[in-house]
Image (cartoon, helix red, strand yellow):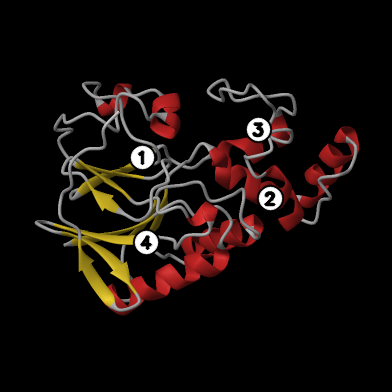
Amino acid sequence: MRLYVIGDVHGHLDQLKAAHDRIFRDGGRDAVIAHVGDLIDRGPDSRGVVDYLMTGQAQGRPWIVTRGNHDRFLPQYLSQPDWVDPDLSSRLHWTLHSGLGAPETLRSYGVDPALPPDRMLAEAKRAVPAAHAAFLASLPLYFLHPLALVVHAGVRPGVDLQDQAEEDLVWIRQGFLNSPVDHGPLVVHGHTAIQTATHYGNRLNVDGGAAYGRPLCAAIVERDAVYLLTDDGRVPLEPQDLPCD
């Protein structure tokens, strides 16, 4: 038994397809692939990423996609235009925050992010397929597999999975990243960009920073081993010390 997991995509369709190709070579085209979310923002083709994954699922591919914090922004913007994510320290709207990646996402749908706000919203409502917004809004918050718990950001230690708050599942850092607690299953997550996929014993971070120009990580979880999957094959990931505060 094995599980393949792909890190935060952030609009990089070419890297997503390349990661899938690496997985297909290793495990076949019917491999179970979980994606930790953050499909959109920052990269050049958020629309293409959403369409590609939706199409694969519709064709029966065993692809699971969990909800990232960035995946909430576009559907919320379309349905509640004034919504600001309460977990953003800046308290800035998605379209006004310089680092969230709204302009790139809007451009991928053919919307000019320099338009006046009312017109930009109208164009976005016209350009973004309702099926795309519904897909992003309905992504599950986690995927529990016999080998691992896949979630975007992590979990609140000591809280039952069914009682975890959405805000923690898509946003948590402090309290999770430095926790040595045995969570039961291996927690496979993204959200916190590092240099490459890293195994910390109780958790595996697969966000290698594709949003910032680094390669999109694909990892393999097996019963007694974890690997990074590269163009040259598998690279074993041995547990590392937890990062310091």
Q: Is residue 129 visible?
A: no
> What label sits on residue 71 in the rendered view?
none
Residue type, numbered disc 3: Gln
Q: In this view, does 222 lie to the left or right of 135?
A: left
Residue type, numbered disc 2: Thr
Give the spatial CA distance, label 2 vs label 3.
Answer: 14 Å
Label 3 element class: helix
Query: Which quarter of the figure is the N terminus placed in?
Result: bottom left
**Residue 223 x %, y %:** 11, 56
Q: Name the residue under label 3.
A: 76
Residue type, numbered disc 1: Tyr
Q: Are the two marked residues, 2 and 4, in contact with CB atoms closer than 8 angstroms?
A: no
**Residue 110 x %, y %:** 80, 56
Would you call the spot at circle 4 few (<14 residues within 10 Å), some (14-19), or many (20 or more)?
Answer: some
Q: Are the two marked residues, 2 and 3, in contact with CB atoms closer than 8 angstroms?
A: no
Q: Which-is-in-front pick, marks 4 and 3? A: 3
